[in-house]
Amino acid sequence: MQLLSVNVGDLKKASPVRRLGRSTAIAGLRDVHLGGYIHRDVKPANMCFGISPQTRHVLVLVDFGLVRRYKNMDGTVRPLRSRAGFRGTVRYVSIRVHERIDQGPADDLVSLVYSGQCRYSLNNFFGLELLVGDLPWKYIMKGDDVKRAKLELQSGDPQTSFLALTCDSFQEFARAVLSLNTEEEPNYAALQALLTELVGDRKMSDPYDWETNYREAIEGVRVYPYGFQPKCRSRRRCHAVIEEAY
């Protein structure tokens, strides 16, 4: 297994305002999808930075334990199942996953909107949780209540909803992703064009937030080698596991 550095979720927890200004974009998920697979567990804890000076700005998508092939070997899309088992983390899955609808590439992208990521991209990306700190349903434990909160976010007025805390470009990106259906092939080029508007003239070589101002703001946290070394602490996981066949 490749040796990696700290994950994005722990970086967010270590920041004084519990948010990160930038992550990376969607090219990695695009490559996974073009290979015929869906990840089904996209979240900050499954994004790790490289540990060498050459890879410190490369964000790697890890943990393919829930991956599923959604295309046949000939490239055709597999038929949707009448009911699919719950796969993913409650906080980040799409509404379709709550409803036990078979997942597609769009559902990985919805999780991306909720968390922020991915790999091998020249575009940086603002994810909802990493951008504003916490999702509205962070402390909701019941899956049905989390689903209800997501429905309110998706159907509410953008000017008064939680999305109003984000910039116009992110709201447009989120609406584009949330409008995709399961079987729809995402327009990755169009989505990355929206990300380009988000980052402006920033470059991949620019320092991340935790390499500059956050480093000075956190006391008692060792920097290793260019990010935060998180303190170990117990946390409740809302990772739903249902014993159903893939």
Image (tube, grey):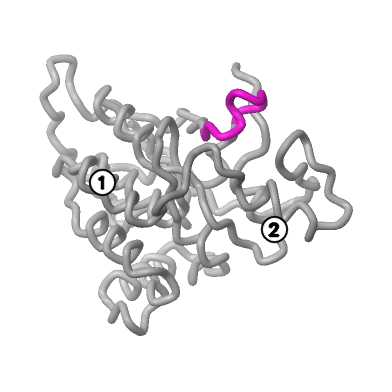
- Horizontal and vertical percent for residue 141? 54, 65
First reached walking from the N terminus: tag 2 or tag 1: 2
The circle drawn on residue 106 is: 1
Report x, y in % for residue 52. Answer: 66, 23
Q: Which mark is residue 95?
A: none
The answer to whether 189 appears left or right of 66 in the picture is: left
Q: Residue 174 appears at what percent x and percent y?
A: 31, 60
121 is higher (above) or lower (below) than 129: above
**SS at badge 1:** helix
Q: Which mark is residue 15?
A: 2
Report whether 158 appears left or right of 77: right
**Amino acid type shown at disc 2:** Ser
* Residue 92 found in image quarter: bottom left
In three-dimensional space, the C-alpha distance between marks 2 and 1, rounded to whole angstroms, equals 30 Å
User: Badges 2 and 1: C-beta atoms under 8 Å apart?
Assistant: no
Residue sitting at the far right? 220
Residue at coordinates 36% horizontally, 84% vertically from top-left? Answer: 160
The answer to which image quadrant residue 225 occupies is top right
Work out whether residue 36 can be spotted: yes
Tell me which segment is drawn in magenta.
Answer: 50-59
At which x and y percent is residue 188? 23, 41
Label 2: state its secondary structure. Answer: loop
State which mark lies toward you, 2 or 1: 2
| Magenta-drawn stretch, dominant element (helix, strand or loop) | loop
**Does residue 242 appear in this view?**
no
Q: Residue at x 32, y 55 (%)?
A: 197
Please report the residue visible at 67 percent of the width from the left and 38 percent of the height from the top.
Answer: 6
Classify 108 as above or below 216: above
